[in-house]
Image (cartoon, rainbow, N blue to C red):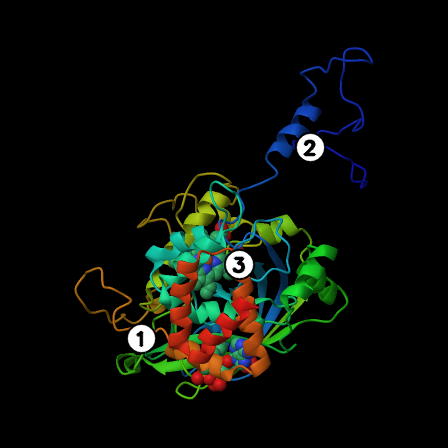
């Protein structure tokens, strides 16, 4: 065989002519036996898969994580076992509400999802550029997302739906304030922080548990666009973030983030004045200071966007020994939701796709189904467990210490006895006068066309955060 890459059918047969269909006579009709034509059309019909139900528009790259500080007293995770240790990873960033073809420069939360290929399996941190979220009970997630997507009749985004929902969900105030502040419209994803947002847990070699929050702080600084600047950018290019990230990496200007953790001893969770598992709250830095851990660098663009970025399957359920979950209700729901989405979006054996496949040996007993292309266990007689044929067995060393849980099963009112105003106030207080006036103006702009009774209901919440916040938005609404 020649080394020349001759064009073939998917079954490997050489193609003699890729310009002309097989026809009866020069004017046609086309013959049904033109298998080459049929294969091309059939493949084209299957070139799209369902877009992600949220976070459909995204950008990604490969990189490395290097440990710079020792945290082995908190976790036995192999990724952190030694200062200087480097682990490969893939990152996917995204907007939340827009579809696959949405413009990049839109005001929206940015997804910040990482898959670390560790020796004990893939560890995914599927976070955002915000340390908190709009809701604290997962039962409200589909409702919240409906308000962000298109109205069923108009097929337009609906500010009325958004403010109707937010004004009746005061737990959203913290995230709403971040969304309409400068950081809600970043110029690109090199200039944002990433947060694991949820409380996770660490457990060390002695079986001691700690609660932990992950913070990836940009080393490029923060950059944002005003609404007016973003409108100009979108007019010129819809792909501003893709161009920025791809271009920076191609030119060798590798973006970097410093990983910090906040660590809370297990029993402190019973003492903090706020629920440390509430996703609408941060842990104040003065109580739980940032501990430096390492540096994340993105340094390689994908070769095939679809295969590597569209088909990447990020899931908060992907944890490794030394890292665990927490009672956070939102996290618990996400542990279910992502792998379920992947089975639907990508197919049964999505974890075997090259971008998702762990870089460590994988031995499981899942059997057949769509895309079953990987080999049997080394011993093909060991296809159930327990077996007598040297099949893979469980490793008790990977056992996590037991998780303390207490309480009667009930539907507890998560709005009762919860301060939804204190932390948004701390944020508003930290903004400069200029930042506040842009925040107020951005909110007013987003409220255009919203019925007065909904606007009034929301203004009451801003007043409770700070009278200056409510007054600022009122003034901006008049202007
Ligand atoms: P600190 O003053 O110790 O921390 C303030 C944090 O706010 C820093 O992490 C900083 O991130 C971030 N920040 C600074 N300026 C802005 C801005 N213009 N928009 C958004 N974030 C900004 O105070 P606390 O820990 O007591 O937190 C006070 C408030 O800060 C919180 O209520 C929360 O809204 C916000 N915040 C807190 C975080 C936390 O984990 N404690 C994390 C992020 C925000 P950076 O270093 O990147 O500038
Ligand atoms: C994507 C569900 C909350 C960050 C997704 C997807 C689903 C989902 C189904 C699509 C997955 C896929 O097809 O690959 C949920 C549910 C939530 C929730 C049910 C709450 C109960 C959150 C929170 C964050 C977050 C709190 C951040 C802290 C992301 C990111 C992606 C995503 C970054 C895109 C991942 C990627 O790049 O592939 N979410 N989500 N989500 N979600 Fe969530």
Quadrant of the rendered image containing residue 453: bottom left
Q: In this picture, is 402 found above or below 61?
A: below
Quickly name the residue at label 3. Answer: 448
Q: CA distance from mark 2 to mark 3?
A: 59 Å
Q: Nearer the viewer, residue 95 or 88?
A: 95
Q: Nearer the viewer, residue 233 or 197?
A: 233
The extreme front residue here reads 478
Residue 221 place in picture, x, y as percent = 64, 78
Question: Residue at (57%, 68%) from the top-left corner?
Answer: 479
Q: Nearer the viewer, mark 2 or mark 3?
A: 3
Residue 169 place in picture, x, y as percent = 36, 63
Quickly name the residue at label 2. Answer: 12
Left or right: residue 25 versus residue 269 is right
Q: CA distance from mark 1 to mark 2?
A: 60 Å
Tell me the quarter of the image containing the N terminus.
top right
Quickly name the residue at label 1. Answer: 275
Q: Looking at the image, is mark 3 or mark 1 earlier in the sequence?
A: 1
Q: Is mark 2 within 8 Å of ligand 2?
A: no
Q: Nearer the viewer, residue 470 or 158?
A: 470
Q: Looking at the image, is mark 2 or mark 3 earlier in the sequence?
A: 2
Q: In this picture, is 305 found above or below 44?
A: below
Q: Looking at the image, is mark 1 or mark 2 earlier in the sequence?
A: 2
Asked whether residue 77 is in view, the answer is yes
Q: Secondary structure at mark 1?
A: loop
Q: Nearer the viewer, mark 3 or mark 1?
A: 3
Q: CA distance from mark 3 to mark 1?
A: 35 Å
Question: Residue at (26%, 80%) from the top-left corner?
Answer: 270
């Amino acid at each position: 065989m020649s080394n020349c890459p001759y064009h073939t059918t998917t079954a490997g047969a050489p193609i003699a002519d890729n310009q002309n269909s097989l026809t009866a006579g020069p004017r046609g009709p086309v013959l049904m036996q033109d298998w080459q034509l049929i294969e091309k059309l059939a493949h084209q019909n299957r070139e799209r898969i369902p877009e992600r139900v949220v976070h459909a528009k995204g950008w990604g790259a490969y990189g490395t994580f290097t440990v710079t500080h020792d945290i082995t007293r908190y976790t036995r995770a192999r990724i952190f076992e030694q200062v200087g240790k480097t682990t490969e990873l893939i990152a996917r960033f995204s907007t939340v509400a827009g579809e696959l073809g949405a413009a990049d420069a839109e005001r929206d939360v940015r997804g910040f999802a990482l898959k670390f290929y560790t020796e004990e399996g893939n560890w995914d941190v599927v976070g955002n550029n915000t340390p908190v979220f709009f809701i604290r009970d997962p039962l409200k997630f589909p409702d919240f997302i409906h308000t962000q997507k298109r109205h069923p009749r108009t097929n337009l985004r609906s500010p009325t739906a958004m403010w109707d929902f937010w004004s009746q969900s005061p737990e959203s105030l913290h995230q709403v304030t971040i969304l309409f502040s400068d950081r809600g419209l970043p110029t690109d994803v090199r200039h944002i922080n990433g947060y694991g947002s949820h409380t996770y847990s660490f457990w060390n070699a002695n079986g001691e548990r700690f609660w932990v929050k992950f913070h990836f702080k940009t080393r490029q600084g923060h950059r944002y666009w005003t609404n007016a600047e973003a409108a100009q950018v979108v007019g010129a290019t819809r792909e501003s973030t893709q161009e920025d990230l791809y271009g920076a990496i191609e030119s060798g200007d590798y973006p970097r983030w410093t990983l910090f953790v906040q660590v809370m001893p297990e029993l402190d969770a019973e003492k903090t004045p706020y629920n440390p598992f509430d996703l609408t709250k941060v842990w104040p830095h003065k109580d739980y200071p940032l501990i430096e851990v390492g540096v994340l660098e993105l340094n390689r663009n994908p070769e095939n966007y679809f295969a590597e970025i569209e088909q990447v399957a990020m899931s908060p359920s992907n944890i490794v020994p030394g890292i665990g979950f927490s009672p956070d209700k939102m996290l618990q729901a996400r542990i279910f939701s992502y792998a379920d989405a992947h089975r639907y979006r990508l197919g049964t054996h999505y974890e075997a796709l090259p971008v998702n496949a762990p870089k460590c040996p994988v031995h499981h007993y899942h059997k057949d189904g769509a895309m079953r292309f990987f080999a049997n266990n080394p011993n093909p007689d060991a296809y159930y467990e327990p077996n007598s044929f040297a099949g893979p067995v469980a490793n008790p060393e990977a056992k996590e210490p037991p998780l303390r849980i207490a309480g009667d099963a009930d539907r507890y009112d998560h709005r009762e006895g919860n301060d939804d105003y204190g932390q948004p106030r701390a944020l508003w207080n930290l903004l400069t006068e200029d930042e506040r006036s842009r925040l107020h103006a951005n909110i007013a702009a987003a409220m255009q066309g919203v019925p007065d009774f909904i606007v009034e209901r929301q203004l009451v919440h801003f007043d409770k955060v700070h009278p200056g916040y409510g007054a600022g938005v009122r003034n901006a609404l008049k202007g």
